[in-house]
Image (cartoon, rainbow, N blue to C red):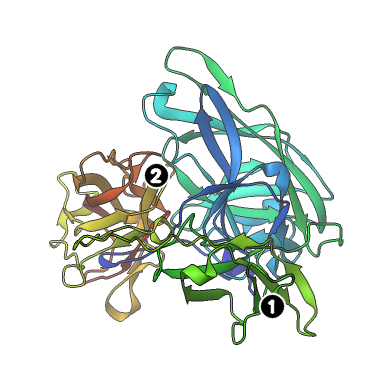
Amino acid sequence: MRTTGARRLAALAGAAVIAGGVLLVPTAAAAAEKVVLAKGHTDAVDVHYHDGELSLEVHDDTVSPSVNRDPADVTFQVLPEAAMTVPDDPRFAFLGPAGSQIWLLPLTQDPDLLWPGWNTTTLGSGVFAGDKVQLSLVEVTGPGNVWVFTQDSFGGPIMKFRSDDGLPDAIDVPIRTHAHANWAFSALGAYTLTFQADATLTDGTTVSTGPVDYAFVVGELDGTGPETVLSIAGMADEYQPGDTVTLQAVQTPQTELDHYHWFSRCPGSDDFAIIAGEAGASYSFTATRELNACEYQVKLYDDNHSVVATSAEVWLWVAFTPTDPEASQTITASIDPTQGALVISVDPDDRSVVLPPAQLTSGGDSWESTGNLRPVTVTDTRAGTPGWSASGQLPENFTGPDGATFSSGYLGWTPQVVDQSAGQGVVAGPVVEPYVVGAGGGLGSSAVLGSAPTGVGRGTATLSAGLQLRLPTETVPGTYTATLTLTAI
């Protein structure tokens, strides 16, 4: 077994030294093919509101560019490698006897497993009463029980949904939330998880998605699931002579196969011809008028060089070279929409936060220190302005003298929008208080630093946050450090 329960269910932990994280997220698009998602990031329960209708979609970030899918077109696979034993910890007794087997998609990302979550970052403020929606797990059918839970700063479970004590289960989810959790299954086989989102508009009108089925398969597929689909991304509507054309083969679902051949068929030819030397997922060449109206196709091969999937053809259109008898020049500048990205960064020379020495509070019940996060820059150059959410988390404990530690949950923040481009609608994330026994809190779990709704995210924004550290009086004196990880989606 590849991962122990103690490792997967370990408490999330802390930071005061900042390491900038970068995540590129292409423009989301619609997709209609049947797919199996088995590895990578996906917002499985993605809440949308358009034209008075509340809906649930799947935001699939396992492909590039990312796409939104109908849940009916998606099978979520919990790979056999997700198997683990229930830890000998009474806090997790709800999962079964210690040492028994479950299958777990963990709260923190494992690149070899699926990382599903839920998302309300596309929902605008002032639309729903309380700026929140209610997400419910209405029903579960399948061979075993299902539990969806997060963890507090000390590793204890915070239950969101569970099928073994009666459904429906409901949670309130604020707008602009992007969250992940542990998804645990007690048995191999096929499951249907039925989710529903409900909300009340600010005028008192109620809206609902109604029940929406999500298909999960724990273990190997039975062979009836969708096959690998191959497509070509990157072809623009038209090119000028001399432009660079870059085509990308996209597998859905993504497999471990990486051997391709590219083919072309130009006017006057009846058959596709192989393009010599092109055996990778990407193919680049220079557009010329001679290539106008050529078609391109890519095929994926297995280890026996058998064709696994063949893409539909895409057409190349190259404009005529302008002719002008006068002594003039035409200069054309363009921004390739396929090259847009979402980038979060920090200045490498301004990435450390040194909090002043903690002082005993007036009540004498804790140590406290405050400071400010160094500037965090989020730049969105993607076409379609899908919006974004920037988050931070302290994945490890603060470490100090002689191996002493304290939990990252003792650090909280008050996010701030320092600056943003004209036309942006960036808003600061919610205040996260330091950990309080019985109430949770702290940056041991992922927290939103700032976000931009759909349509108003394009540009550059600078974010920061006021930091508050609150420690128990028994904390060992000394200097402690940890690392804050920043991501944007």
The structure residue drawn at horizontal position 44% and vertical position 57%, both measured from the top left corner, is: 25
The x and y percentages for residue 326 are 21, 60
> Which residue matches tag 1?
273
Three-letter code, disc 1: Ala
In depth, the one of 53 and 262 nearer the eye is: 262
Residue 449 appears in the picture as rendered: yes
In depth, the one of 86 and 421 nearer the eye is: 421
Three-letter code, disc 2: Gly
Residue 472 appears in the picture as rendered: no
Residue 104 shown left or right of residue 339 in the figure = right
The structure residue drawn at horizontal position 56% and vertical position 28%, both measured from the top left corner, is: 54
Q: Is residue 128 above or below residue 65?
A: above
Name the image quarter holding residue 429. Answer: top left
Name the secondary structure under disc 1.
strand
Name the secondary structure under disc 2.
loop
The x and y percentages for residue 352 are 20, 68
The x and y percentages for residue 102 are 73, 61
Residue farthest to the top, as pictured: 204
> Which residue matches tag 2?
387
Which corner quadrant holds the N terminus?
A: bottom right
- Circle 1 residues within 10 Å: few <14, some 14–19, many ≥20: some
